């Protein structure tokens, strides 16, 4: 594997995991999760974090403001429609950032202008310029996006982008909003815009590609070769519909093929795997096994001829090393006799950041788990850390549950919860199995008609003593909330996941947790 030449053209990495990524169905995050992801993005070395869409909800605005205060190195951006009220909300959310950015947009394709905006081209140009001018009066860093640019008339794009530059835009973004473009076509569009936008040299030219045809990364790389200076992406490629260009794929393509592409980026690739695992755990969106770079099989070799080659020289079948993306090779076994030093060292090797208080608490959880399991794996430790990093105030806390279930009887569950006011409440319910009965008992205590939209349960590791990791998504009045639970008892893991989702819902109702999502 070769690193790109240090003299190469450096591409700006704009991460929109917390905005476009979170808009994927079921991928909403609460405030602690967003802050954890933002911290990992900073360690990853992204240049810009788009933290949300401030005008979408008070929760989103509060989360953007919290991220703006928490991270120092990356710029922090908020999306805003080309409306003064949206821009005001965006500025209020990012103004305390070390490097604030307002990102405003308007659609420019004929179909969007006619059917969505119901505006003519002249009005769109004027609205775009006016929005950028107003945003620039508040913030020195303003990005303007022409939504659905890949289906827009190139001459019209040159016109609207020229007006945006004249109004003060510092970044011009070219979105392939519906994933319609193919690489050669998209590269040609970028070249045409670089040649046709008046004042383009005063702004950064950016691209934002969606993956509807599976071409988001290919289109982004083609655009970089054609001169794009910023690339917008998400961790694990999550996002609307089929997702966005995957950050990890772009970063490793620039690292391994930087000489061919004539570009590089500032991503610390050893932080890629920890970032992928954190985003997957926070959103409940699993990474497919054969996913490039971060999938379970990305560095697995089963075929005999491949194994022989790898043993002789890893470069026979690996163009990058597991270590280069943060996959640890040290497999030191941890168990109930392991001490704090070994535990802390393993956490550090896994790229997991913990404060002293969190480290002490998780070490105690590790010792409890080690009493139940013969050995504790890396995946077990990751699961413990991810669970601890997303704590919310607990309106409902599990005290105990008792299950009566079998093949010839109706499942019954008695669940006792501790409430925030210090009282306890216990209810009994029957259901189609112990988990369903437990959820129904909890619903009686909570007193709301919750819709269980998604439930999944998987083993963290192999073996009969493996921890079960449950993911739950519930809905109430059109809002969705994710929860995650972990236990060697799968019923307990499920109950804890359901309560985590409910506590996320309660936290939002009590003052904004960052789960508000852009439409």
Image (spheres, rainbow, N blue to C red):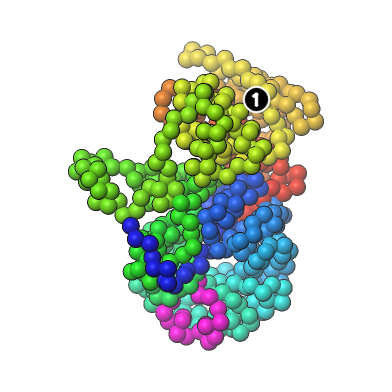
Q: Nearer the viewer, residue 148 or 45?
A: 45
> In which image quadrant can residue 392 be found?
top right
**Image height check: is 161 above or below 463?**
below
Instruction: Give how far across and how far down residue 458 sits, in percent.
Output: 46, 33
Q: 260 or 314, which is in the foreground?
A: 314
Give the image location of residue 417, x and y in percent: 70, 25
When the figure is inspected, residue 384 is found, relative to residue 352, above or below; the finding is: above
| Quarter of the picture holding the N terminus | bottom left
Q: Give the residue at x 28% y 42%.
A: 301
Seen at 35% across and 43% down, the residue is 297
Task: Report the residue marked by disc 1.
Answer: 441
Q: Which quarter of the picture shows residue 60?
A: bottom right
Is residue 327 visible in this depiction of the protein? yes
225 to 435, vertically: above or below = below
Query: x%, y% of residue 343?
Result: 53, 33
Q: Is 110 on the left-hand or right-hand side of 104?
A: left
Left or right: 186 in relation to 410: left
The quadrant the C terminus occupies is: bottom right
Would you say residue 192 sits in the magenta stretch?
yes
Q: Quadrant of residue 249?
A: bottom left
Determine crowd level at label 1: few under 14, some 14-19, many 20+ residues with C-alpha closer than 10 A: many
> Please, what is the dominant secondary structure of the magenta stretch?
helix
Q: Nearer the viewer, residue 341 or 273?
A: 341
Task: Give the residue at the far top of this rendering.
Answer: 408
Residue 128 covered by magenta stretch: no
**x and y, in percent, of residue 170 in the image:** 59, 76
Q: Residue at x 49, y 12 (%)?
A: 408
Helix, strand, or loop for circle 1? helix
Of residues 70 and 191, which is closer to you in this image?
70
Residue most extreme to the front: 341
Region in magenta: 189-206
């Amino acid at each position: 594997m070769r690193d790109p030449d240090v003299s190469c053209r450096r591409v700006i990495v704009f991460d929109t995991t917390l905005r476009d990524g979170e808009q994927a169905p079921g991928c909403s995050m609460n405030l602690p999760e967003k802050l954890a992801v933002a911290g990992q993005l900073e360690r990853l070395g992204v240049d810009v974090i788009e933290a949300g869409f401030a005008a979408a909800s008070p929760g989103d605005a509060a989360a953007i403001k919290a991220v703006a205060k928490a991270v120092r190195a990356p710029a922090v951006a908020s999306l805003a429609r080309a409306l003064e009220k949206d821009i005001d909300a965006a500025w209020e959310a990012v103004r305390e950032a070390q490097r604030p950015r307002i990102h405003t947009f308007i659609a420019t394709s004929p179909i969007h202008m006619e059917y969505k905006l119901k505006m003519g081209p002249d009005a769109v140009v004027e609205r775009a310029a006016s929005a950028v001018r107003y945003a620039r009066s508040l913030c020195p860093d303003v990005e303007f996006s022409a939504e659905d640019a890949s289906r827009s008339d190139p001459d019209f794009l040159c016109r609207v982008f020229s007006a945006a530059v004249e109004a003060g835009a510092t970044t011009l973004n070219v979105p392939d909003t519906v994933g319609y473009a193919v690489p050669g076509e998209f590269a040609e569009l970028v070249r045409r815009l670089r040649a046709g936008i008046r004042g383009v040299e005063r702004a950064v030219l950016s691209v934002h590609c969606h993956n509807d045809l599976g071409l988001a990364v290919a289109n982004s790389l083609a655009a970089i070769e054609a001169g794009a200076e910023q690339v917008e992406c998400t961790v694990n490629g999550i996002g609307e519909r089929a997702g966005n260009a995957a950050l990890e794929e772009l970063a490793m393509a620039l690292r391994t093929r930087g000489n061919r592409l004539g570009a590089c980026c500032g991503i610390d690739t050893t932080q890629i795997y920890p970032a992928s695992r954190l985003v997957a755990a926070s959103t409940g969106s699993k990474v497919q096994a054969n996913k490039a770079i971060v999938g379970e099989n990305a560095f697995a070799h089963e075929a005999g001829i491949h194994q022989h080659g790898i043993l002789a020289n890893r470069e026979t079948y690996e163009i990058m090393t597991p270590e280069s993306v943060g996959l640890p090779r040290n497999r030191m076994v941890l168990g109930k006799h392991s001490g704090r030093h070994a535990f802390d060292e393993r956490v550090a090797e896994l790229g997991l950041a913990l404060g002293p208080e969190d480290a002490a608490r998780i070490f105690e959880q590790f010792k409890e788990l080690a009493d139940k399991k013969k050995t504790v794996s890396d995946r077990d430790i990751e699961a413990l850390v991810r669970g601890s990093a997303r704590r919310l105030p607990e309106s409902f806390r599990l005290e105990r549950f008792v299950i009566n279930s079998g093949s010839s009887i109706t499942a019954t569950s008695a669940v006792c919860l501790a409430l925030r006011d210090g009282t306890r409440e216990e209810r009994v319910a029957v259901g189609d199995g112990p988990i369903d009965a437990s959820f129904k008992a909890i619903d009686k205590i909570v007193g709301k008609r919750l819709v269980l939209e998604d439930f999944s349960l998987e083993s963290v590791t192999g073996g009969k003593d493996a921890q079960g990791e449950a993911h739950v998504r519930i809905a109430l009045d059109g809002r969705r909330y994710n929860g995650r639970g972990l236990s060697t008892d799968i019923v307990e893991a499920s109950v804890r996941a359901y309560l985590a989702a409910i506590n996320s819902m309660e936290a939002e109702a009590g003052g904004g947790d960052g789960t508000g999502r852009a439409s």
